[in-house]
Image: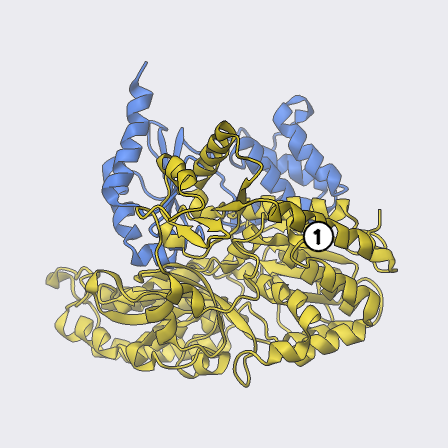
Amino acid sequence: MSTVSSPLAPSPKPAEDRRWRMVNRTMRLHGHKPHALIETLHAVQESFGYLDLDSLRYVAAALQVPLSRVFAVATFYHYFSMKPLGDHTCVICMGTACYIGGAAGILEKVQDAYQVAPGETTADNRLSLVTARCLGSCGLAPAGVFDGKVAGKLSPEGVLEKLGRWTHHDDDP
Amino acid sequence: MTMTLEELQSIARIEQDRQQGYAHRIHVCIAAGCLSCQSGSVMEALEKEIGRRGIEHWCQVKGVGCLGLCKGGPLIAVEPAGILYHSVQVGDVTDILDALGGNSVPRIDAGNQAYFFERQQKIVLENCGRIDPERIEDYIATDGYAALYRALRDMTPREVVDQVVASGLRGRGGAGFPTGLKWTAVAKAPEGDKYVICNADEGDPGAFMDRSVLESDPQRVIEGMTIAGYAVGANRGYIYVRAEYPLAVKRLRTAIAQAERLGLLGKDIFNSPFSFDIKVRLGAGAFVCGEETALIASIEGRLGRPRPRPPFPAEFGLWGRPTLINNVETFANVRSIVLKGGDWFAGIGTAKSKGTKVFALAGRVCNTGLIEVPMGTSLREIVFDIGGGIPEGRRFKAVQTGGPSGGCIPEAHLDMPVDYESLAQVGSIMGSGGMIVMDESACMVDVAKFFIEFCMSESCGKCAPCRVGTAQIHQLLSKISRGDAGPEDLTLLEALCDLVRHTSLCGLGQTAPNPVLSTLRYFRDEYTAHIAERTCSAGACRMAVPEEAL
C-alpha cells in the first residue's frame, strides 16, 4: 500500500482512461447500486490486474458505499489482489487431489529456486508465485496455471523448466 | 419473441436430421481438463484436415463437454462407431481420419473401457460428451426444453412441486436436505418477489462436478432453474458461480443469451403468463460462500458471512424475500424428473437416497475423471471397478469424500453402499461429490492438517469457535506432525474437535473437525506413532530436531 499518495487524496476522475470504461460500464449496468460492489471490483481487477486504494476510493464514491466496506470486501475475498503481479504468473493448485499428487513438493522447489513465497513476486518483478485453492482440474493433478494457461500432470522438474524458459526468453534482446 | 411447441420441435428435428446426415461424427472434448491438454488445437487440426480432404459433408467435428475419463485427455469419441481415443495429439489427426469406417488406430485407442462406462448410469451427465455446450439447438435436439414446456403448459406449479417431492431428490450440494421440502416452503411463502439461486460456488478442493456440468451442458441447469421458478412462483434467478471457472462462466453466459434469443428465458415463455430471467454473479474465492446465507450476502455485494438460521432463505432470503437455493447438480436433475416423473426417479437408488450421484474421482486411482452412479453403489465398485484401482501396484489406504467437511473412509468400509446415511454413519458426508483416493504414501495426520489449514484460512471470522478453534486444532496437528506432541495432546484435540463441532455458527465450523475425527477414528495408530515414536510411516511429515521438543 506504499504506492498510495495520501489517505486524503481526492477520488480520481479517470473517465478518460480506456481501462476505466469497463468499470464504469459495469456500474452503469447495475444502476450504480451498492450491491454492484463485488461485480465492480471484478471489473477493476480485470482491467488493471489488481486493486489499489485509489480504485477502491473511486468505486466507493461512485456506488456510495463507505470506503471501509469496500476495503473489507476487497480484502475478505481471496480472488481479489491488492498487489500487482509480475511479468509472468505461476499458479500452483493446492487442492486435495493436487496435494495428494505432490503439489507441495513442486511449490517448495519453485520457492527455493526463485526465492519467492506464495502470494509474492520476485524482486526483479519477473515472476509471481500464486497458490490456488482448487482449479477443478483434479483429473490431471497436480495442476497449475502458467500465464493463464492451465497445465496438468506437473512434475517439479517440468515446472522449473517451464519457468526457466520464461526467464530465458526475457533475457533475449 | 415467444416460442411455440411446433417451433421447438422443428428446431430439434432440423438439428437431428443435420447430425444424422453425417456418416461419421467426431466428438472432441472441450471441457477444461482436455482443453488444458491442448484438445483445442487437435480440434482445429481435425477441421483443417477435413476441409483439405473435402469430406466435410459426411464427417462432422464437434466440440463436446466432458467425456468422463479425464486422465486420458485429450479425449475424442468417434460416432457412430463408438471408438474412444485418448491422449490424442495433432499428429494423430491424419491417422484418425484414415481409419474412419474401418478399424480404429490402435496407438491411441482407449480400448475396452466397459467397466468405466457400464457401471455408470447417467441422468445429470446424459448429454455430457454428446452435445456442443455452446449451441442451444444441440440441446433442444435431445428433448431440451420439452420439460419446461410440459411444466408450463400441462402442469400447475403445485403439480411440479409434487413431482419433485415424489422423486425423493435430495440436495446435491452436500447436506442432502429434501429438495421437495425446500420447493414446497418457497412455493407456500406469500406472493410477491421471490428468487431462485443456483449455487455454483464449488469450493471444495478436489471437486469438479459442477464445473463439468456447467461447461458441458449449461442449458440443463438453466431449464431446471426456470422450472423451479415456475414451481415456486419466482421470476428472477441468479447463478452464483466461481470466478475461478472462467470457461464455465463464459459458456453459461452464452447459454443464457441463446435461451433469451429463442424466448426460452424472458417474458411469456411458451405463450404462458410466466416470465423468468437469469443473471450470473461471480464469486470471489471465499469457500464460506457455499453456505446459503453467506452466498446471499455475497450476491448483495456484502462480505460473505453466514447469519444464524432461522429465518431460512425460504422465508427471508435475497433482499429479504423468499428464496430457493439449490446446487447445480440438483437443478440438473429437474428436467428428467419432470419428463419421466417423480416415481421413475424414486425407483433409482436406495430407500432414503434416490437417483444418481455425480462424483469427481481423483487422487491415487487409475481412472481419474467424472462419473455418475446410482445411489447405493459400493465404494469398492467405484474405486476398483470404475476407477480401475490404485496405480503402480500400491495399496489402497483411504478414500476421502465430502472435502474439508467430510472424512477419510478406510478399507474396512469399502463395501458400504454410497448414500447419505451410510456415509454419515462412518463419519464422513456425501458432500458435493469430490472423491479422493489415497494410497499408502498419504499420511493421515498430514491429510487432516491439510483440511484444517483450509478451514482455518477460509473461516469467515464471525464466530469464535470456528475462528479460534480451527487455528488451535491446526496448531495441535502441526505439533503432532513435527513429533513435538505428548499423549495428552490427543485428548485435548478430541475435546477441541467436539467443541468446534457443536458450537460453531454455520456448516463450515460444524463440519471442520470431521477430517480430524475420522482419521483419529480409523488411523489412530498413525497419530500415536507420530507422538510416541516420532515416526511418519508415509514419510510425509518431517520431525523436528529432538532438542526443540517441548
The letter of the yellow chain is B
- On-image quarter of the C terminus of chain B: bottom left
Q: Label 1 crowding class (10 Å Cα cut-off): few <14, some 14-19, many 20+?
A: many
Q: Quadrant of residue B438?
A: bottom left
Image location of residue B499, percent across then percent down: 43, 78
**Residue matched to label 1:** B12
Q: Is residue A99 visible to us here?
A: yes
* Residue closest to the eye, B201 or B147: B147
Residue positioned most to the bottom: B351
Whether A20 is drawn above or below B489: the answer is above
Residue at the image point whose x is 16% and y is 65% from the top: B549
Q: Chain of mark 1?
A: B
Residue at 67 percent across and 29 percent down: it is: A21
Task: From the image, state the color of chain A.
Answer: blue
Relative to residue B424, is residue B527 drawn left or right?
A: left
**Near-viewer residue (B81 or A109):** B81
In the image, taking residue A139 as reference, residue B223 lies left or right, namely: right
Q: Is residue A12 above or below residue A26?
A: above
Along the horizontal axis of the image, is B402 left or right of A46?
left
In the picture, residue A119 is in which quadrant? top left
- Secondary element under disc 1, as helix, strand or loop, is helix
Residue type indicated by callout 1: Ala
Residue A45 position in % (x across, y down): 55, 37
